[in-house]
Structures are given as C-alpha cells and as structure tokens.
Amino acid sequence: MIVPGVGIRLEAVKALVVLPTYNESANIAVVLRRIRAAAGPVDVLVVDDSSPDGTAEMAEALGRELGGIEVLRRPEKQGLGSAYRDGFRIGLSRGYDTLVEMDADLSHDPATLPEILRQIGVGADLVIGTRYMPGGSIPDWPWPRRAISKTGNLYARCLLGISARDSTSGFRAYHRRALERIDLDAVRADGYGFQVEMVYLVERGGGLLTEVPIEFRDRTLGHSKMSSRIVVEALVLVTWWGLRDRFRKDSARAPIRAA
Ligand SMILES: Nc1nc2c(ncn2[C@@H]2O[C@H](COP(=O)(O)OP(=O)(O)OP(=O)(O)O)[C@@H](O)[C@H]2O)c(=O)[nH]1
Ligand SMILES: [Mg+2]
C-alpha cells in the first residue's frame, strides 16, 4: 500500500498501533477492521485491562480473522498511561520503528493513519493528530468545552515551552528513537497528563515534532473513562513541571533538535 501524495510504502514503516481498551466491546471490532482497511500492513497491540464486557476475547477473535493483531491482557484496570508504557516497551523490544497511540472508541479516525505514518517516514520523531490547527475540528463539542480544552493546551504550551498546539491529543505516533531517549519507568502520569508529559519529554530531548489536522468525534457507543481526577492530575503536573523548570535554569530550555 502506497501512502497517497508521497511515494512512501506503508510496508516500509514497521508500525505498531497500541490500542488501550477498557470495556470497548461495542467499538473494538469496527476500529480494528477500520485500521486494517486504512493502513493494511500495520500491526496492532490491544492492551486490555481485563474488561468485564469481553473486549479482549473479541479482539483475539478479530486477530484470528485479520492477522497482525495481538492482545496484551493485564490483570486489572491500571490506567491509560500505564497501558501505553507497557505497549511501547513491547513494541520497542520487538523492533518496531514506529509506535502509534490511538483510542479504541472511534474518536480517532483510522483513515488519518497513513498521513501520520507518512510524517514519521519523512523524519518526524513525534507526529500529533491536532484538533487546534487549520483543518482540525471537534464538531461534537459545544464552544465552552472547546474553549476549556484549548485554554488547557495554551497553558501547557506557555508554561512548558513546548511547541505542540494540542499536547493533550491521544492520536499520535512516535519514532522509536524518540521513545528510546525517554525513561518510561520515570513517566508516572495518566490520561491527559501522560500525553502532555510525553510531548514535553520528546521536545526536551531534541525530538522533531510535526502536527497533522484531525477531526475528533465523540464516542457514540460505550462509556467514557475520563474523570475529573485525570484533569486535575494534568493541571497539577503541568504547573509543577513549569515551576520546577523556572527554578532549574539548565533543565527545560534544551534545543528542540539535538543529536
Ligand atoms: N487498558 C486500559 N485502557 C483504558 C483505560 N482507561 C481508558 N482506556 C481506553 O483508553 C481510550 C480512551 O478512553 P476514553 O474513556 O474514551 O477517554 P477519553 O477518550 O480521554 O475521553 P472521552 O472524551 O470521554 O472519550 C479508550 O480506548 C479506552 O477504552 C485503562 O485504565 N486501561
Ligand atoms: Mg474517548
């Protein structure tokens, strides 16, 4: 399969989509089929935290049918950040050169995957699917919710000196060289905090960031696992990192691109 626009073969990008799931039985089959249809050669690792609704069993059945899909079953619900950390460790140890983050609730359109992978193919260390750039949108959100999310992103951007316009977005891809520079064991945040922390660490480590516009849709099936605890955690951590870096002159303002 050739990515339209530029002649990069998807087969040449050895990519693993890490798909964290908790009670996504209503969405898992559709999202896996759509990933396969949009980006045929990529592999998928479903990281399931013993969903009581049988998500893992459904994913395994889809794996037998479509191939290239594995399920990591974890014993209990441990959060999104921890699911990605485990998924990345497995992907890195197996030699994948690109690790993709994506929600399983169809908020992220798998049709954007080829463009995200193309950007990795042309040299990006981190590609973020961004809602807040020309071409990006969140059609299902009323303006007050969009404003809160945008303000949170602006706060993180100003305080941490990062360039990402949508550092809380969970649709993104890392080249393995960016992840190898990060001590995943030291990344503690979950949810939005995890997403912001990863952008911060990649940019601080000299990683090259690229953004592509995405349309973010609200889930139509299943239930959100988002909580106010996750929002508060992100706010507290961003404030802490920002203040800490202001007092540690040499820590935060590393050049954006390093060896
Ligand atoms: N393995 C695992 N996956 C999780 C956990 N919490 C959430 N997820 C998955 O992470 C993805 C995002 O979770 P959502 O509940 O949709 O949260 P969100 O997309 O940030 O918020 P919404 O706006 O409510 O959709 C989904 O695929 C969830 O199934 C968890 O503790 N463990
Ligand atoms: Mg969601």
Image: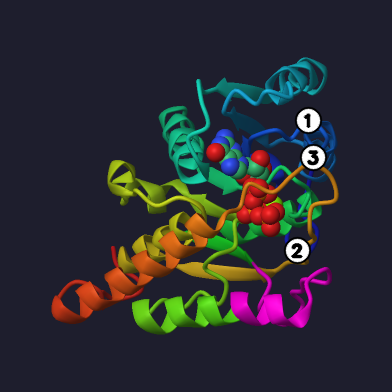
For label 3, the crowd category at 10 Å Cα-Cα, with few meaning under 14, some 14 to 19 and many 20 or more, is many
Queried whether the magenta region covers residue 131, the answer comes back as yes
Q: Which amino acid type corresponds to the residue marked 3 in the rendered image?
A: Val
Label placed on residue 25: 1
2 part of magenta stretch? no
Amino acid type of the residue that numbered disc 1 sits on in the rendered structure: Ser
Percent of width and height locating residue 221: 84, 44
Question: Above or below — where is 245 with respect to 4?
Answer: below
**Residue 20 as seen in the image, left or right of residue 32:** left
Q: Which residues are magenta?
A: 130-149
Q: CA distance from mark 2 to mark 3?
A: 14 Å
> What number of labels is visible?
3
**Label 1 crowd (10 A; few <14 / some 14-19 / many >=20):** many
Looking at the rendered structure, the secondary structure element under dot 1 is: loop
Q: Secondary structure at mark 2?
A: loop
How far apart, in angstroms, are the residues tagged by discs 2 and 1? Answer: 20 Å
Q: On residue 216, which mark appears? A: 2
Residue under label 3, please give it: 31
Residue at 77% in and 34% down? 28
Marks 1/3: CA–CA distance? 10 Å
**45 in relation to 240, above or below:** above
Q: Who comes first in sequence, dot 2 or dot 1?
A: 1
